[in-house]
Structures are given as C-alpha cells and as structure tokens.
Amino acid sequence: MKSAKHGRLVAPAMAIIFGAGLAAAVAAAQGWEAAIPVAAIAAAGAVGYYVWGGRDSDRGAMLGQRVDERQSLLRMGAQALAAVAVAVTGVVGYMVAVALKDPVWPFVLFLGVEAITFTAGLVVYGARGAR
C-alpha cells in the first residue's frame, strides 16, 4: 500500500487549482459577478473531495491516495475507459467536421496525442502482458 503524508489533500488541491483557473477565465470573459458562483462550486467540490477522501471505501481510498493493488487496477480500468471515450469522440468529431467541411485539425491533434501517448506507454511500461 502506497500513501503520501498529505495524500488526502491532493484531490481537493486539484479541485481548487482548476476551479480557480475556470473562475479566472469566466471573470475575464463575463466579469467577476459571473465568476463568484463558479468559485463557490469549486470550493464546495474541494470540501466534498476532502470529506470523501477520508471515508473508508474504495473511492475514498483513491481520493485519499491510500490505494492497494485492487484499487490501482480499478483506477487503471477507469483511465483506459476514459481514453477509449476520448478516442471515439475524436473519431466522431473528425467525421462530423469532414461532413460539414469544417477544419479537422483539432480532432487530428487529439487523436495524434492519444496515439503518441499510447505508444509511449508501451515503451515506458513495456508490453509485459503481451508476452
């Protein structure tokens, strides 16, 4: 089992960082009045992550950075599913862009990044399961 000294704070800190970035973007586009609810939702999410990370459950252990091998496998499966969803979305977006005669470079970029990172993952982690 791997755990960090302040592992329970990782997920809330990420929620605060990304929430602050989103609030800043909303403030730049629409003013501070529109950004206040975004910041409040991000703060509430961070509190929720902190509370959930302290619970004695699989998801609580993942959010609190106290995972064992089974939970690591569950997280890896979830990440793989997310990667497949991004790939399918990129392919569908590419096909729609071609049909509408719109620029396709954003979709080619996403699919290229996914192909490169998949290949890099095979190189870095090895294809041990394929042997």
Image (spheres, rainbow, N blue to C red):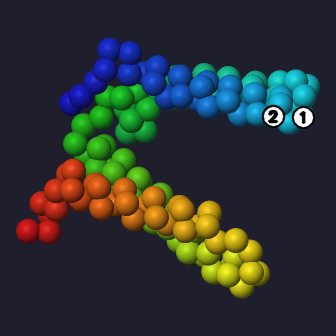
Given the image, on which type of amino acid does mark 2 rest? Val
Residue at 25%, 46% (x, y): give it.
70
Task: From the viewer's side, name the closer residue of 81 and 26.
Answer: 26
- Looking at the rendering, which quadrant does residue 84 occupy? bottom left
* Residues tagged 2 and 1 counted as in contact (Cβ below 8 A): yes
The alpha-carbon separation of the residues under discs 2 and 1 comes to: 6 Å
Q: Is residue 123 left or right of residue 20?
A: left
Residue at 22%, 42% (x, y): give it.
69
Which residue extends farthest left? 131
Crowding around mark 2 (Cα neighbors within 10 Å: few <14, some 14 to 19, many 20+) is some
The C terminus appears in which quarter of the rendering?
A: bottom left
- Looking at the rendering, which quadrant does residue 41 occupy? top right
Q: Position of residue 62 (x, y in %)?
A: 39, 35
Q: Secondary structure at mark 2?
A: helix
Task: Identify residue for label 2.
Answer: 26
Q: Position of residue 112 (x, y in %)?
A: 46, 64
The label shown at residue 30 is 1
Q: Is 127 above or below relative to 102?
A: above
Q: Is residue 96 left or right of residue 1?
A: right
Q: Is 79 above or below relative to 24?
A: below
Which residue extends farthest top? 5
Q: Position of residue 49 (x, y in %)?
A: 54, 28
The label shown at residue 41 is none
Q: Position of residue 93 (x, y in %)?
A: 64, 72
Q: Is residue 60 left or right of residue 32?
A: left
The N terminus appears in which quarter of the rendering?
A: top left
Task: From the viewer's side, name the closer residue of 120 and 70.
Answer: 120
Q: Secondary structure at mark 1?
A: helix
Given the image, on which type of amino acid does mark 1 rest? Gln
Residue at 29%, 55% (x, y): give it.
120
